[in-house]
Amino acid sequence: MSGDAVRSGVLVVDKGRGATSFDVVAIVRRCLGVRRIGHAGTLDPDATGVLPILVGEATKLTPYLVDQDKEYLAVVRFGLTTDTHDVSGRVLSQTPVDAIAPARLEEACRAFIGHIKQVPPMFSAVHHQGRRLYELAREGIEVEREPREVTIRSITVEKVDGPRATIRVVCGKGTYVRVLASDLGAALGYGGAVESLVRCRVGPFGLRDAIAWSELMAGGRELWSRVRPVDSVLAGWPVVRLDGAGATTFGHGQAADVVPAAAAGEGFVRVHHIAGPMIGVGELMAGGSKVRPVRILHADRPRTRILPA
């Protein structure tokens, strides 16, 4: 078994301003000395906050983490529109803004809660004919983008101060808070752009779980002590535990018997060896008496855990 197989988990980073998500991946790869590393959801360079970095076998769980809700705290400046939808972009228009009544802003926010359509910004990592949109935007090229459906769970107005407002947004995958700020500003008749953006949570991981940016920049192999277990990605999921024979069957890609049958009866579950370690993601069948493999993890099998020196 490869060295990567015993070097798996999640390092939750509080990303610093100015760094790209790929910058963070490169730093963690260098510090931990592990090749298979990825992030769970791009965070804009000017944004800060929670960026989960999945290490080794945990990268197999990326789709499940990306699918979970995210929470942001954004300061929106009304009366300003830019080509990037944040204050770092080229100014397109400026409009004087009188004091905005919190009640009026809250009413405007309600129209954006639920399943809504967003047009991806040109300054984004969305692909168009094999190229990233931001690459085209930097060349002065703008292309037609199809609106995409996204889900916004809630928008809470936390503060209004002149032309600025602080809002807390809980949303599903693929949501651009910059676009929300622009659309919200347009609805108010002023335009709007993000002045600052902090991602407070991705799925089960919050800022309280994150390693500080300064600590990451100073870190080396000792960062392994901050890597969370693979199963933390799916915290809150129902768990099925298999004995030795069942775990072997599951690991070979075959449906395994669940004894006793799982109470959930159906749906996706975390599958663990009876000794504790997570061995994959499964889907319950036959009223919960069997579980079929959906993702198989080869890391963290029941044995002595080996970490790099």
Image (cartoon, helix red, strand yellow):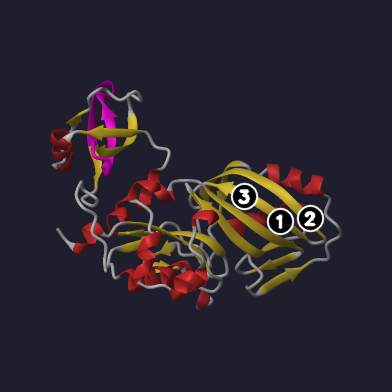
- In percent of the image, x 45 and y 57: which residue is there? 41
- In percent of the image, x 81 and y 45: which residue is there? 103
Circle 3 residue: 169
Direction right: furthest residue:
98
- In percent of the image, x 84 and y 50: which residue is there? 101
Q: Start and end of the magenta stretch? A: 274-292
- In percent of the image, x 83 and y 54: which residue is there? 100
Q: Identify which amino acid the numbered label 3 is placed on.
A: Val
- Could you say where residue 76 lies in the image, as x and y percent from the top left? 70, 60
- Distance between the Cα atoms at labels 2 and 3? 15 Å
Contact (Cβ within 8 Å) of mark 1 with mark 2 = yes
Q: Secondary structure at mark 2?
A: strand
- Distance between the Cα atoms at labels 3 and 1? 10 Å
| Magenta span contains residue 3 | no
Circle 1 residue: 166
Q: Identify which amino acid the numbered label 1 is placed on.
A: Thr
Q: Identify which amino acid the numbered label 2 is placed on.
A: Val
Give the quadrant of residue 92.
bottom right
- Distance between the Cα atoms at labels 1 and 2? 6 Å
Circle 2 residue: 160
